[in-house]
Amino acid sequence: MRKTLYLKFLLAYLIFGFFGFTIVATFGSSMVLEHLKREKAETLYKEATLIANTYASDLYNNEISLDSVKPQMDSLSVYLDSVIWIINPSGRMILDTNTPVDLEHPRIVEDFNAAQPAGSYYTTGTFYDSFQEEMLSVFAPITSDFKVRGYVVIHTSLAALHSSGENILRISYIILVILFLLSLIILIFFTEMVYLPLRKITEATEQYAAGNLHYEFQVDSEDEIGYLAASLSYMASAIARSEDNQKKFIANVSHDFRSPLTSIRGYLEAMLDGTIPPELYEKYLKIVLNETERLTKLTNSLLTLNNLNTKGMVLEKMDFDINTVIRETAASLEGTCQQKHIAIELVLTGSRLYVRADMGKIQQVLYNLLDNAIKFSHNDSVIKIETTEKRSKVFISVKDSGIGIPKDSLKLIWDRFYKTDLSRGKDKKGTGLGLSITKEIIQAHNENINVISTEGVGSEFIFSLPLVDEDED
């Protein structure tokens, strides 16, 4: 079996893992760093605003001295792990937590412009070349009398933020690896629940295509895959049974044709080479004629069965008196009954009993059932034909007291060419198609036929037909 489906699924799984790591490594890194910047900037901005509104404002209003502010700013700088500046709008440094207070030699930040961050309250970089490394700088204005007197600027190293970002990304990578490994469950599930059953189904179809219709396989699943496997197995078994039935059918037809042909040929050759004297010709010609009649009957039965199996078969339904048809069929077999001293007892409901069906085919059904009853009945016995009305149906029963049917053969008597071991010795001229034709005709009428039989006691065949209300117009 080609493994393209499995390889495609595995390739998709690997591509998913590759792009997952790539996206985390590229977009994730910048997104995490930007998030940390904003979060740190917001925290420092709150501190800078608080300083600007308290210590720095008091300092500019001369309510507190620079020497008293410096220790508190230094402590706060250590706590925030940052550098805190108080700076004039001109860039003149008032306070720097990294250096002592020196009012005589103030430090000037060249080109300082608080409006340069373009509306943002923080910026990144070396802050006008004031630092040797990248810093995150936060501004908070110091106002007095509605004027900006200066700024509180808090600087923190971006290296610490980068280190935190790398730690977060490292955790993300670990989680991604765990998720990637856990997603192997999907691959295992696909392998066990989809791929392996599909391999079994594909292998089975290859076996069936090669002609091995008896190949067996099993998929233990109750989902669509299991249903597909069960349907395929059932289809193969049905085809196998059909093929076996076809072979059996051909074998039976060949056997039933070969036997009379062999008999005819043997008698004719014996007559031609003188083995049979002329004075016996009439006797053996009658035998040959009987064998030809047997072949004709077999051929007609096959043609009838074939026509009954044809799709779209149209029944010529009409309303007719079933009692009359029963009487006429029984009368047509009167000569055969007399030879075996068999009596036919008719127990019919009413003088007339109308049904809707194909009269010709129902007459054939009655003939087949009555002919079988005569063949397998003992001499000096009675065959009973009875009609019964029940729930807008007419049930016709043909009952004999003959040899009966073995219990293990009851389900097989409807098969074509089937003959029980008991019937083979008595029915030399039967084709084994009569009951098959009978069942096909009844089923074509959407009715049922059943048999009740006891070996050595007799058999009763019962079939139904729709009753016609005589009051209908």
Image (spheres, rainbow, N blue to C red):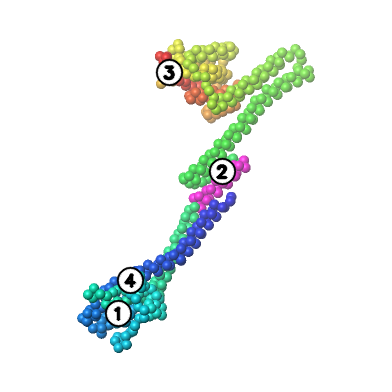
Of marks 1 and 4, the one in the foreground = 1
Q: Is residue 95 left or right of residue 25?
A: left
Distance between the Cα atoms at labels 3 and 2?
A: 49 Å
Q: Of the residues under marks 4 and 2, which one precedes in the sequence?
A: 4
Magenta stretch in the rendered image: 191-211
Q: Of the residues under marks 3 and 1, which one precedes in the sequence?
A: 1
Tell me, yes or no, if residue 455 can be seen here.
Answer: no
Kind of residue indicated by mark 4? Tyr
Image quadrant where one finds the C terminus: top left
**Label 1–label 4 contact, CB within 8 A:** no
* Residue visible at 36% across and 72% down in the picture: 117
Of marks 3 and 4, the one in the foreground = 4
Residue indicated by mark 4: 121
Residue indicated by mark 3: 389
Kind of residue indicated by mark 1? Asn
- Which residue in the rendered view is the most extreme toward the left? 63
Disc 1 on helix, strand or loop? loop
Kind of residue indicated by mark 3? Glu
User: For residue 349, which quarter of the picture?
Assistant: top left
Q: Which mark is residue 216?
A: 2
Image coordinates of residue 129 in percent, x first then y, are 39, 79
Q: Which mark is residue 88?
A: 1
Query: What is the magenta segment's predominant secondary structure?
Result: helix
Of marks 4 and 2, the one in the foreground = 4
Q: Of the residues under marks 3 and 2, which one precedes in the sequence?
A: 2
Relative vertical location of residue 331 with respect to residue 264 in this rendering, above or below:
above
Kind of residue indicated by mark 2? Glu
